[in-house]
Amino acid sequence: MAFTGTAVVKQITDQIVRITGLSLAAGAAGTIGLTGETGTAPGVTLPASFKTEHYAYLGVNVPFADSIECTAEAAAVGVATAIPVSVVKSGTSVADFRITITNTHGSLATPNLEIMVRNHT
């Protein structure tokens, strides 16, 4: 199962994107990918203007999983029950990089989420 709702994607800078309008059913997972992805389509694709590029630190390539940060938190006021979510990043290129956000609660849906994606280059 994937995100529920309609993604509202707002680019804040060339390296920061805010996504709202989404939630996750109990035990569900949603994915976020980069423009140019291949394979299974993610639930949300970041805008092409979101800048991602590999760079080297001390001569070693820094993978996207280390340079792209993602946070997901409740976007609703007065949420009575905190619903834990996990954020896992995978892949090494624009084509296969994915952020997977999973509702780890077995019986409750998340409230609407505010998801922030930042690239640190």
Image (cartoon, rainbow, N blue to C red):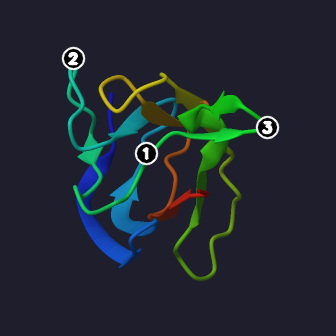
Q: Which mark is residue 58?
A: 3
Mark 1, residue position: 24
- Quadrant of the image containing the C terminus: bottom right
Query: Which structural element holds mark 3?
Result: loop
Three-letter amino acid code at disc 3? Leu
Q: CA distance from mark 3 to mark 1?
A: 39 Å
Nearer to us in this view, 1 or 100:
100
Q: CA distance from mark 2 to mark 3?
A: 32 Å
Three-letter amino acid code at disc 2? Gly
Query: Which structural element holds mark 1?
Result: loop
The residue positioned 54% from the left and 37% from the top of the image is 64
- Tell me residue 66's x, y (percent): 67, 38
Q: Is residue 93 above or below residue 12?
A: above
Identify the mark nearer the N-term, 3 or 1: 1
Q: Going by the picture, which residue comes out furthest to the front? A: 59
Instruction: Residue 72: name its quadrant.
Output: bottom right
Q: Is residue 33 above or below residue 73?
A: above
Counting every numbered tag in the picture gives 3
- Tell me residue 47's x, y (percent): 24, 58
Residue 103 at least partly seen: no
Q: Is residue 121 above or below residue 109?
A: below
The residue positioned 42% from the left and 40% from the top of the image is 25
Three-letter amino acid code at disc 1? Leu
Identify the mark nearer the N-term, 2 or 1: 1
Q: Which mark is residue 39?
A: 2
Q: Is residue 7 above or below residue 1?
A: below
The residue positioned 27% from the left and 39% from the top of the image is 43
- Tell me residue 113's x, y (percent): 48, 62
> Quick check: 103 left or right of 42?
right
